[in-house]
Amino acid sequence: ERLTEVSKRAESGDPVLQRFLAIRQWSRHESVPSTPGGRPGLHWLQQAAEQGHRAAQIEIAQHYEQTPKQSHAVAAFKFREQAASQGDAESYFKTAVCFRDGVGCTKDLAKAAGMLCQALLVGYPDSISAAGTDPVVLASVLAILSNDSGVNVESLPIATVNLSNAGLTELPRRLPCSLTDLDLSNNRLTKVSDALRELKSLSALNLSNNLV
């Protein structure tokens, strides 16, 4: 009788109970409405996610991330973006990677950089390494962070940075002090930035094919 009441409330739109039923039915392998080929309980989890339940958004995104189908990539991105809008650190990161690589969405390096900054600011550890796979994204991340007085860019633990072919006309005002290897080749830099003089650990600097 209690489960019947829970089901009625879930059907009437209670996202907490919708997620409860999804978890219960997954654990008991009960047959419930789901998408074709979906896991039991997926119907309820999707209902909860659609109504803004953050945990449900994360869990259903994780479900879709396990398969290579393009339609699933789109769904995973959708729910990751929604969870990110509610402050989930991993979802900031996952959404950024989608924007960077064009997986489940239109490729957008500016949005990727913004999301990676958000992920970094809430403590997601892989944000800088993900930014580093694309010089344009990394340049944008460093520029955004260097203009934020609340971020200690100098203390970021980064040793090697590749900003080659990043379209730079100037460097970010602040850079991580731990840098030992900095590639600035193939940009449009016209002068040596003061920020470089602060890099006491820098041992390799490539400024070839600039306007210096």
Image (spheres, grey):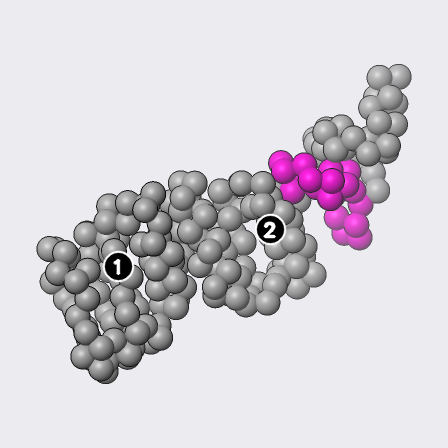
Give the side of residue 123 with respect to residue 83, left or right.
left
Rendered residue at 48%/65% (across/down):
109
Residue ID for mark 2: 81
Residue 45 is covered by the magenta coloring: yes
For mark 2, does the 10 Å Cα neighbourhood hold few (<14), some (14 to 19), or many (20 or more) residues?
many
Q: Are marks 1 and 2 in contact (CB under 8 Å)?
A: no
Give the side of residue 43 with respect to residue 55, left or right.
right
Give the side of residue 13 with respect to residue 94, left or right.
right
Rendered residue at 20%/56% (across/down):
179
Residue ID for mark 1: 173
Image location (x, y in percent) of residue 203 = 11, 62
Rendered residue at 25%/56% (across/down):
174
Question: Magenta region: which residues?
Answer: 34-57
Image location (x, y in percent) of residue 116 = 44, 53
Rendered residue at 51%/48% (across/down):
92
Secondary structure of the residue carrying tag 1 is loop
